[in-house]
Amino acid sequence: MSEPSPRVAVVTGAARGIGLGIAERLLGDGMAVALLDLDAPGVKESAERLRALGARVGAVVADVSDPGQVAAALQQVERELGPPTVLVNNAGVTRDAYLFKMKVEDWDLVLQVHLRGAFLMSQATQAYMTQAGWGRIVNISSASALGLRGQANYSAAKAGLQGLTKTLALELGRFGVTVNSVAPGFVMTDMTRATAARLGIPWEEYVPKIEAEIPVRRAGVPADIAHAVSYFASEGAGYVSGQVLYVAGGPTS
């Protein structure tokens, strides 16, 4: 008997940071992984590095908020790696500002990438999953879903992802598809570095200040989030669906 083909995963926002860390973990779990990102040079460079290590990986350039690009991206994944049955919706941007300063276009952009993007990717990918009778969708939310000053757009989008998670879990469960969410706390990435720069606080001062407020007394790293995603994407997590797991170094409120 021939060996079963490896699961094919798509990770959005995978050129760097948390997305890349998740992709690397899923590759380590034995999956073939498509790195999807709007940053063409970044995603191609990351894919080439992983291929050099022997990984079965694809590089896909697409805007997750554009239906046509999403459809073309998944066709590319199917052609190059096979039908995708694991999806990690990680793509995101920040445009932080207090409510009275927030521009409408910045509200729209954040909601389009995080929430519209996850909707479009899930809608397109579920066809492969339901046909296979097996699938895993993991949405990357955030502890900011509980509210954070200066992030009305980001918080709304991340809270929306949790509602989307629970609804899709109800709709897709009978097809063998689970849908869960991982909600990171503070994780050291280019995005959080940009936040420190925006606030005018040196990174070397910013991180210890944040860590002092985290019960485990350390900041998160992409591998922390990847570990949680790995569980939700695994064969053994088939009886877990509609859940939101906060990976934040302590209780959330």
Image (spheres, rainbow, N blue to C red):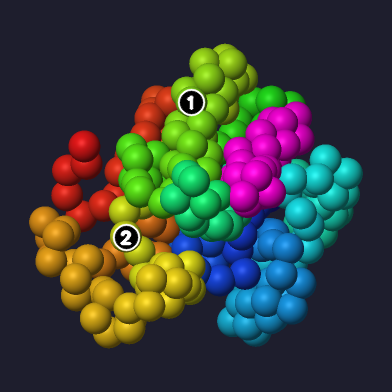
The residue furthest front is: 100
Q: Nearer the viewer, residue 185 or 83?
A: 185
Residue 74 to residue 49: above or below: above
In contact (CB < 8 Å): disc 1 and disc 2 = no
Tell me residue 127's x, y (percent): 75, 29
Asked whether 131 or 40 is in front, the reply is 40
Q: Is residue 107 magenta?
A: yes
Where 250 falls versus 123 (above or below)? below
Residue with the mark numbered 2: 186
Residue where numbered disc 1 is placed: 163
Q: Determine whether, in the image, residue 43 is placed left or right of residue 18.
A: right
- The local secondary structure at tag 1 comes to helix
Disc 1 or 2, which lies upstream in sequence? Answer: 1
Amino acid carrying label 1: it is Gly
Q: How far, Cα to Cα, is label 1 from label 2?
A: 22 Å
How crowded pointer 2 is (Cα within 10 Å; few <14, some 14-19, many 20+) is rated as: many
Question: Who is closer to the viewer here, 208 or 197?
Answer: 197
Q: Quadrant of the C terminus?
A: top left
Is residue 58 left or right of 137 when viewed as pictured?
right
Confirm whether the magenta stretch covers residue 124. yes
| Residue pictured at 49% horizontal, 46% vertical | 100
Q: Which residues are magenta?
A: 103-128
Please state the horizontal and vertical placement of residue 105, each as a whole percent of the image: 68, 49
Q: Residue at x 83, y 40 (%)?
A: 67
* Percent coordinates x, y for residue 92 in the rendering: 58, 54
Nearest the eye: 250 or 228 = 250
Numbered tag placed on residue 201 in the rendering: none
- Neighbourhood count class around disc 1 (C-alpha, 10 Å): few under 14, some 14–19, many 20 upward: some
Q: Is residue 213 among what the camera can see? A: yes
Residue 6 in sight in this render: no
Residue 171 is situated, as x and y percent measured from the top left of the image, at: 59, 16
